[in-house]
Image: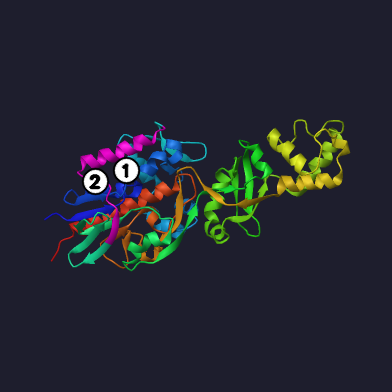
Amino acid sequence: MAKTLYIIGGGASGFFCAVNAARLYPDLRVVILEKSAKLLSKVKVSGGGRCNVTHACFDIAEMARRYPRGGNFVKKIFHEFFTSDTINWFEERGVQLKTEADGRMFPVSDSSQTIIDCLLNEAGRYGVTIRMQEAVTGIRKTAAGFEIETAKGTVFHSDYVCVACGGFPKAEQFEWLRNLGHTIAVPVPSLFTFNSPQHPLTELMGVSVTEARVAVAGTKLHQRGALLVTHWGISGPAVLRLSAWAARDLAGQEWTFTAIINWLPELSETELRERFVTWRSEKAAQKIGNKNPLELPGRLWLFLLTRSGIDEHRRWADLPSKNQNLLIRNLLAFELPVKGKTTYKEEFVTAGGITLAEVEPQTMMSRKIPGLFFTGEVIDVDGITGGYNFQNAWSTGFIAARSAGQLASAPSF
């Protein structure tokens, strides 16, 4: 009688586990249980609807440094299935990927539907059964394997189970997994933007800086990258990366803190002061509010002048040293009070989940319950924005597929 693998969750890691298990082990019956009426919904919206499949990083140690939680764990799984494997897997199925200037990789079609269609086609080709609107409420280990109970009261029997349900925002939502004897790292949000309600900076909505440094006051936490001013606060890669690395710290502060923005991270304070001396001499008769010598967006420059008590019509030669000092401070260490967060588009990520010490990285199997696997965001691994979370999904999904198939194929005595 054919052995069965039930996969809980029809997202990226669950689907990748399903299609690879069914392809590599044709005698294994593979079933996906998806709680909603949609499959691969996160794939659909990721990358602005283009799907940031992975990141063009081919050094395992370097790639692992992009994961605020689980860096050492992903080093091990990447030895089993890495970026190049992902690229080859999709290309073998007719999906060509391209690399953008920042390293993010997308399908050449620029459509997430290309990735979705590829995975759905594989599921159809290898006979994966998909059951929608089957919310799992409990798993029990039995002598024969597993019993999976759903909200409808249905009970499925399976030899092996892969939990690929994604992260949960609340600790109590993990209760059905905790009941199996697993430990849960408390979930907190990651990848979010910073809210500064009614702060004057928000009047610059739409202004962006290609390279800024954002830090959390009173900590050593900081990140560099592009920054975007929004109508609610600040966003952009620098903010999103910082939100990931600081996820637990900021949750502990209930997302109320001071962000320190350096608009000119390439310049030291000494270098900037020397430039001011030069400008006061060379631009003596020019108005400070005219085209700024730092190539900052014009609206931002005028805003910083105002915050520093400087009339934009004042001449460079007449700039008081007190106001110059304040302007330098606002350029290199602008203090922005933050109160609250906003989920970044639809690409929410949760830090937390199944404690990594309880998962075997070479197989993705539970160290506590043989035949039970975990993949994707349900484990305590999360990456910064840029394709890293999808790479974790592909890697863990493939490893679990291979491991479950090997178990099913092993001779029984």
Q: Quadrant of the N terminus?
A: bottom left
Q: Quadrant of the C terminus?
A: bottom left
Q: Is label 2 in a helix, a strand or a loop?
A: strand
Horizontally, residue 129 falls left or right of residue 199, namely: left
Residue 9 screen position, x and y as percent: 31, 51
Q: Residue at x 64, y 41 (%)?
A: 202
Badge 2 amino acid: Ile
Give the label on residue 130, or none. 2
342 or 409: which is nearer to us? 342
Rendered position, 83 above or below 404? above
| Residue 98 is at least partly visible in this image | no
Label tally:
2
Badge 1 amino acid: Leu
Does the segment drawn in magenta span residue 2? no
Residue 392 screen position, x and y as percent: 40, 51
Does the segment drawn in magenta span residue 114? yes
Of the image marks 1 and 2, the number of the one nearer the N terminus:
1
Tell me the magenta residue range. Answer: 110-138
Give the label on residue 39, or none. 1
In contact (CB < 8 Å): disc 1 and disc 2: yes
